[in-house]
Amino acid sequence: MTPADMRIPACLTLWLSFAIGAAADTPRGIYRARPVPDSPLLMASGMAWSKTGLIIADRKEKRLVALRPDGKFETVIKLPNPFGVAFDERGRMLASEKIDSNHILRVRDDGKTEILVDAPDAGTPHALAVHKNGTIYWSGFPDGGTRSRSVDGRVTIHKPRIGHTFGIALSPKQDWLYVTSKLPDKDRRAVWRFPVGPDGTLGEGQPFFFLKDLKPKIDGLPPAKDGGDTLVGWIGRIHGLAIDRDGNFFIGGAESHTSGSAIAVISPNGKEVLAMILDVPGNIASLALTGDCRTLYIAGASAYRLFQVSLRQ
């Protein structure tokens, strides 16, 4: 499989899916994830969907690997330290690398890579999101801040410089950019949002919702491990993020002794827990939706097999 075969992401970069109006059913209630058959052990810090399958940044084997529609896993390209993965408006594969070298790169059709943003401008890059005009956004853990690269190559560090950002995603209309902040202080763990202009530029960010303010009220849901009634006990330090074409948030947590090992589905207004997904890895790194937004893939930060859950009951 060549990088050119991976072209055109889905939920078709969310804005296209929203425009054609084929909305997915809103998840409600309790769902249970299961391992993907024949999945290898992965240290998957980032994932993205393309027309030919799921692309995973696997730090264990130092590669981008594809889960093809036939269920086979296949290496796309070897990379020393892959963290985030995304596709641009032309369907070209992008990746972030961190640790030995901090940069944002693009995978060409011939399988070679070109660096789009190098150190120090790249900060400490993790997850990626791409505007339909080609602007690239990325989170920065632990203190790199939320950054962007415009189509003319200009890099901006956006205000405020939120600590411990990890997950990142655009709204269906691409008028908001969301990032998760997994700060150690449990009262500050939140999803933030930045207003997005038509040209992809960002305004100043503000907290959108805090885990401490959300209480799942779902029949049959067992108590969280910390004994509390908020999402703090379920999610722990908020980590993975995905947004479906209806604007629902999927958030997963990591690195918390009180985490209930769950993914919460939050309403577009950030005020209601619609669903909970259980039986997931206890240290979630990344989430990715399929093209129809009806299957969610779940990856763990340590050596886990890939998980999936059908969102149609």
Image (tube, grey):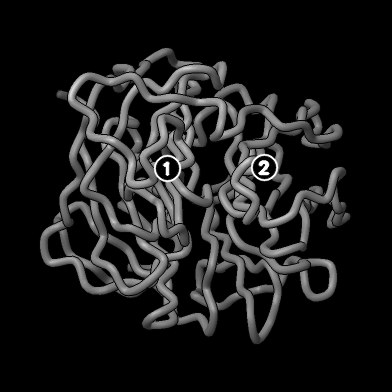
Q: Amino acid at mark 2?
A: Arg
The picture places residue 279, in percent across and down from the top left corner, at 21, 48
Does dot 1 land on a helix, a strand or a loop?
helix
Q: Nearer the viewer, residue 267 or 209?
A: 209
Distance CA(mark 2)–CA(mark 1): 14 Å
Q: What's the residue at 24%, 22% (across, down)?
A: 29
Does dot 2 land on a helix, a strand or a loop?
helix
The picture places residue 128, in percent across and down from the top left corner, at 60, 53
The picture places residue 49, in percent across and down from the top left corner, at 40, 48
What residue would you read off at disc 1? Answer: 233
Residue found farthest to the top: 21
Q: Earlier in the sequence, mark 2 or mark 1?
A: 2
Q: Quadrant of the C terminus?
A: top left
What residue would you read off at disc 2? Answer: 188
Q: Is residue 48 left or right of residue 188?
A: left
Q: Amino acid at mark 1?
A: Gly
Q: What's the residue at 65%, 86% (across, down)?
A: 100
The answer to whether residue 91 of the structure is visible from this angle is yes
Residue 32: quarter of image: top left
Q: What's the residue at 14%, 56% (across, down)?
A: 70
Badge 1: how crowded within 10 Å, few (<14), some, or many (20+)?
A: many
Q: Is residue 22 left or right of residue 118?
A: left
Check the image and report above or below for 56 versus 149. Answer: below
Q: Is residue 276 left or right of residue 312?
A: right
Q: Nearer the viewer, residue 160 or 244?
A: 160
Q: What's the residue at 70%, 76% (across, down)?
A: 102
Q: Is residue 193 left or right of residue 168?
A: right
Residue found farthest to the front: 227
How many numbered tags mark residues here?
2
The answer to whether residue 17 of the structure is visible from this angle is no
